[in-house]
Image (cartoon, rainbow, N blue to C red):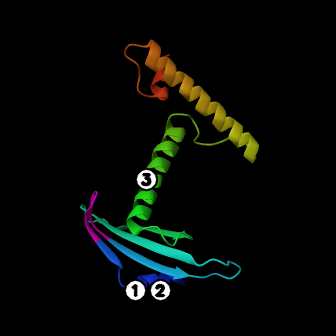
Amino acid sequence: MAKKRTNKSKAVDVWEDEKGFEKVEVYDSTFTMDNIKQALRFIKFAMIPKDKKHSQIMIVTTCMDMSLKTLFRIIRARWDIENSIFKNLKSECGLEHCFVHGGKAVEAVLYLIFIASNIIQLFLLRRLKKHVKTQRELVRLY
């Protein structure tokens, strides 16, 4: 319902030439849900990059007083973190598929992978003159 109402409304703000985007149109509305005491804020960022391929980010938050620019920066930073970390875990740490199930088991495996990754990176940085760039390359070489 909030998405439909927002799509029919006019943009509350338009940012020109915003870090890699030709234009960002911002839509902001509030709505309520049954069994939730607090009002919710629905925000849509419709982005038009310089290559003209449209994309959008939609978020729902309870934070009513944060500026739209700050919310946009936070969500973009989160997107970058998720893309780089998850891509690294899948491609460099062999986590295409996790063979254990259950919260504690997955958490333990992730901790072991993080520890091993940090030890390997420390070794490469301190001991090898021409260190390799990825763990996969290291495994391939040795």
Residue topped by disc 1: 9
Q: Give the residue type at disc 2.
A: Arg
- Is residue 82 visible to us here? yes
Q: Is residue 16 within the magenta segment?
A: yes
Lower position in the chain sequence, tag 3 or tag 2:
2
Label 2 and label 1: CA atoms lie apart by: 6 Å
Label pair 3/2, CB-CB below 8 angstroms:
no
Q: Nearer the viewer, mark 3 or mark 2?
A: 3
Q: Is residue 134 within the magenta segment?
A: no
Where residue 88 sits in the image (x, y, percent)?
A: 49, 39
Q: Identify which residue, 17 or 8, lies in the foreground.
A: 17
Label 3 and label 2: CA atoms lie apart by: 27 Å
Left or right of 16, for residue 64? right
Q: Secondary structure at mark 2?
A: helix
Where residue 53 sits in the image (x, y, percent)?
A: 30, 65
Q: Secondary structure at mark 3?
A: helix
Magenta range is 15-24
Residue topped by disc 3: 77
Residue topped by disc 2: 5
Lower position in the chain sequence, tag 3 or tag 1:
1
Label pair 2/1, CB-CB below 8 angstroms:
yes
